[in-house]
Amino acid sequence: MKQNTSVLKRAGLIVTLLLAASFTVKAQERITLQAAVDRMLANNLNIKQALVSEALSDADLQQSKYNQLPSLSAFTSTGYNFGRSLITGTSDYLSSTSQSVNTNAQMSLTLFQGGQLRNQIIQNRLTVDVNKSNTSKIKNDLILNVVTTYLQILINQDLVTAATQQLDIGNQTLQRSQISFDAGRQTLADLSQAKAQVATANYNLINAQNQLNISVLVLKQYMEMNPNTAITVEKPDISRLTNVQTVFDANQVVMRALDINPDIKLAEAREKTFAQSIKIAQGTFYPTLSLSGGVGSTYNNRFKRFLNNTAVDYQFFDQIRDNFNQSISLSLNIPIFNRFNAHTNVKKAKLNFQNAQLNTQLAKNNLSKIIIQAVLDLNAADKQFQSATQTFQANRDALNVTQQRYDVGLVNSLDYNTAVTNYNKSQNDMIQAQYSVIFRSKIIDYYLGNTITL
């Protein structure tokens, strides 16, 4: 009866654990590569900052257009005068209080300013293009980072699986060594070697799991996701990735990338803005022609008007109407000597443009170098994967033979552990080499402007 109760308790515990595990899996959010990229594009703060910069530059563009419109302002003031004041035409003083009102409106319009207004509009439009190119660059760089991190997670997942398998092998070996030691067929040294093998495998598993956790955390950071959110990174079917393209013409990739790469687009857009800055600076050598006009009127409660030689009150609206005045003026400001400021600004604008040209060429040279290196790395990675696969297959066969001989006492524990170590290392090398081929091929897809998919 007690035995049955114990069995029921263990069964209940197993069911509870399975339900808990099932709940945990359901609670975890499954993340595909496309979902990770989409979430990053929607939530990443660096992209949001870039979009704000776009909006700011667009506001500057609109304002530069508005600067061509006339400016209009109105002014009014009222005041009180009180105390003694000199009576006009006499030497007598009179204590009195008066109120006055002054109103006017002014309008001004710049007719010509050396083309600066028009050139500023063009430059601000180019600045909008710069910020849009910068946003594209940030997005593309982050997409590449997400893909890199996603692939690293897949590598780490396989390494965890391999480390778990290696720990299982170690535990099986330790179990057999313990039986052989108890039966007197192995020495304590053999048993200690088996225990050391288990300890090493356990250490490797802990390290692999830690690397996996770190790479998952990095992916969450790109997506601006709560680090405590449980996610499961969906692993693609590796068999579909065996036909990954590994042969590319570096020159063709470079030519294509130079036309579409966001880094180049950004450098070229900045170069255009600096070219426009030269025209703006040169505009300060030209005169400025402005048109202005205004209207105004005044009122004072001490003013009188005469009707039939009799002074009567001069009403407010009557004074405003009678004192209404207009003005219009055309002004020409000719720069003659401004301590060489205009000359220096033009010189600096030209130097900045030259520097922008150099930055564009540097960006092109750097891109070409990166792509050529990427093609060479892909070729090398493909050869390394083929070699690693052959090495793994050889070590797997060697381990099978060694294990059979070890089980019947024809091989000592040192030789067996060496075979296990070689198998473990070759398995890890093959996993990393396979993903290296995939990743480096996807890198070239990125520079070709292709959508990166797994």
Image (cartoon, rainbow, N blue to C red):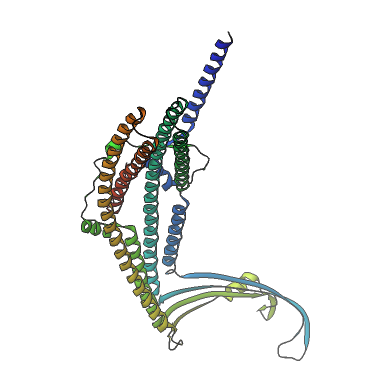
Q: Residue furthest top?
A: 1
**How many marks can you see?**
0
Q: Residue at x 59, y 10 (%)?
A: 2
Question: Which quadrant, please, contains the N terminus?
Answer: top right
176 is higher (above) or lower (below) than 280: above
Q: Can the viewer see residue 450?
A: no
Q: Position of residue 72 (x, y in %)?
A: 50, 69
- Compare residues 328 and 363 and report the one nearer the observer: 363
Q: Can the viewer see residue 372?
A: yes
Question: Which quadrant, please, contains the C terminus?
Answer: top left
Left or right of 383? Residue 149 is right
Q: Residue at x 46, y 87 (%)?
A: 339
Q: Position of residue 383 (x, y in %)?
A: 25, 48
- Compare residues 390 and 226 and report the one nearer the observer: 390
135 is higher (above) or lower (below) than 384: below
410 is higher (above) or lower (below) than 379: above
Q: Residue at x 38, y 54 (%)?
A: 141
- Compare residues 121 and 361 and report the one nearer the observer: 361
Q: Position of residue 67 (x, y in %)?
A: 44, 69
**Quarter residue 236 falls in:** top left
Left or right of 320? Residue 432 is left
Q: Position of residue 372 (x, y in %)?
A: 26, 58
Left or right of 214? Residue 311 is right
**Quarter residue 177 falls in:** top left
